[in-house]
Amino acid sequence: YFIFVANTKFTTMQRRVIMANLTAKELSAIEDQLNCEQNLIKKYRAYAQSASDPQIKSTCEQIANQHKQHFDTLMGYLY
């Protein structure tokens, strides 16, 4: 069982480490959440770019950054 996330590449050694420490069910859950976090990052960055109100733009950027932190935290479980 391998986990694939857009724009994320794992070496063969990293895949072995992932497979050795997590169950297939855990990997699947992390994969799903990583994909959700990536989608939210993209959406909120797009919202920020299209916002004309500075406060809304700032809020969307903050939310995108929070989801990026969530993504990075989840990726940390894979190493």
Image (cartoon, rainbow, N blue to C red):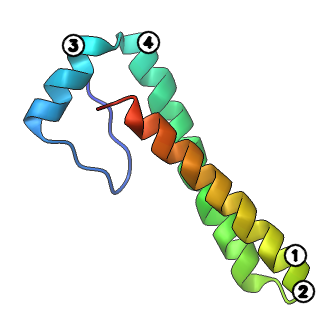
Does 25 sit left or right of 49 as displayed? left
Quadrant in the picture for residue 52: bottom right
Please tell me whether residue 19 is drawn above or below residue 71 in the rendered image: above
First-in-chain label (4 vs 1): 4
Q: Is residue 14 left or right of residue 48?
A: left
In the picture, the disc for residue 74 is none
Tell me, yes or no, whether the two marked residues, 2 and 1, touch with CB atoms within 8 Å: yes
Q: Secondary structure at mark 1?
A: helix
Outermost residue, left side: 12
Q: Residues within 10 Å of mark 4 (few under 14, many from 20)?
A: few
Circle nearer the viewer, 4 or 3: 3
- Using the numbered discs, state the Cα–Cα distance from disc 3 to disc 1 in whole angstroms: 44 Å
* Crowd band around label 3 with a 10 angstrom C-alpha radius: few (<14), some (14–19), many (20+): few
**Picture disc at residue 25:** 4
Contact? badges 4 and 1 (CB < 8 Å): no
CA–CA distance in space, label 4 to label 3: 13 Å
- Element under label 2? loop
Q: Which residue is mark 3?
A: 20
- Residue denoted by label 1: 56
Looking at the image, tell me whether mark 3 or mark 1 is earlier in sequence order: 3
Q: Position of residue 68 (x, y in %)?
A: 56, 54
Query: In what quadrant of the picture does the N terminus appear?
Result: top left
Question: In the image, what residue type sits under mark 1?
Answer: Ile
Residue that numbered label 2 is attached to: 53
